Image (cartoon, rainbow, N blue to C red):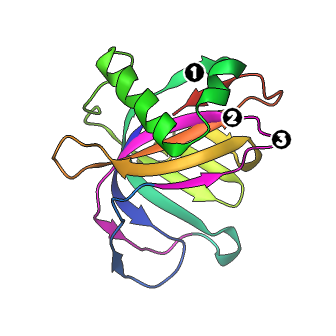
């Protein structure tokens, strides 16, 4: 789970934009099999800045890492097909103490490119997670429901054998 603070693109223009608080999802399941998930908390303040190369376009977001639920079995993965199912599972995990309600104070950088998703330290020296695009089943952004106006980003991924899924 991540809480988003700022967003950067590898283009030379500067511009502010807002991220919607409505639920959004991208489903890349193969043959009805689910994959895994990542969860992050997002704020609506975003900025664009220049990056390394136009050929390596990457959107970067400043996020606060909430947690991960790893190695869910195939049967559990099948029950998390719809966005609402995933949201309910994350809420239940928070209530059961498997995930915190509030992220840690340390900010991370969530980079999204044509190759997948990478979560790294702000200085980009330490990489916490890498998720190749072909293993991402669903990416979902939704309001945390706590009245603070914060958004959560959940990433559901699978392993290469599609036997387990994880929620990040």
Question: Which tag is nearer the camera, tag 2 or tag 3?
Answer: 3
How far is the residue under mark 1 from the one under mark 2?
A: 11 Å
Question: Which tag is nearer the camera, tag 1 or tag 3?
Answer: 3
48 inside magenta stretch: yes
As rendered, which of 98 and 54 lies closer to the eye? 98
Q: Magenta span covers which residues?
A: 24-51
Q: Which residue is mark 1?
A: 70
75 inside magenta stretch: no
Residue 7 point in image, percent of width and height: 40, 63
Q: Residues within 10 Å of mark 3 (few under 14, many from 20)?
A: few
Q: Residue at x 65, y 41 (%)?
A: 131
Nearer the N terminus, badge 1 or badge 3?
3
Q: Residues within 10 Å of mark 1 (few under 14, many from 20)?
A: some
How far is the residue under mark 2 from the one under mark 3?
A: 11 Å
Residue 158 point in image, percent of width and height: 70, 32
Query: Does the CB distance between marks 1 and 3 fall below 8 Å?
Result: no
Figure check: 122 above or below 50: above
Residue 128 visible at all: no
Q: Residue at x 57, y 21 (%)?
A: 70
Q: Which residue is mark 3?
A: 31
Q: Residues within 10 Å of mark 2 (few under 14, many from 20)?
A: many
Occupied quadrant, residue 76: top right
Nearer the N terminus, badge 1 or badge 2?
2
Q: Which mark is residue 35?
A: 2
């Amino acid at each position: 789970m991540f809480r988003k603070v700022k967003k950067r693109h590898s283009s030379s223009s500067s511009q502010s934009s807002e991220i919607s608080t409505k639920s959004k999802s991208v489903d890349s399941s193969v043959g009805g099999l689910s994959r895994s998930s990542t969860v992050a908390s997002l704020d609506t303040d975003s900025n664009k800045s220049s990056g390394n190369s136009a050929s390596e376009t990457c959107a970067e977001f400043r996020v606060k890492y909430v947690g991960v639920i790893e190695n869910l079995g195939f049967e559990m993965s099948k029950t998390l097909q719809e966005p609402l199912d995933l949201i309910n599972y994350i809420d239940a995990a928070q209530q059961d103490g498997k995930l915190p309600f509030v992220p840690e104070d340390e900010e991370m950088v969530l980079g999204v490119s044509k190759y997948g998703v990478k979560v790294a330290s702000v200085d980009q020296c330490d990489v916490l997670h890498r998720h190749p695009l072909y293993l991402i089943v669903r990416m979902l952004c939704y309001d945390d429901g706590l009245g603070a106006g914060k958004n959560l980003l959940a990433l559901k991924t699978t392993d290469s054998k599609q036997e387990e899924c994880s929620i990040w």
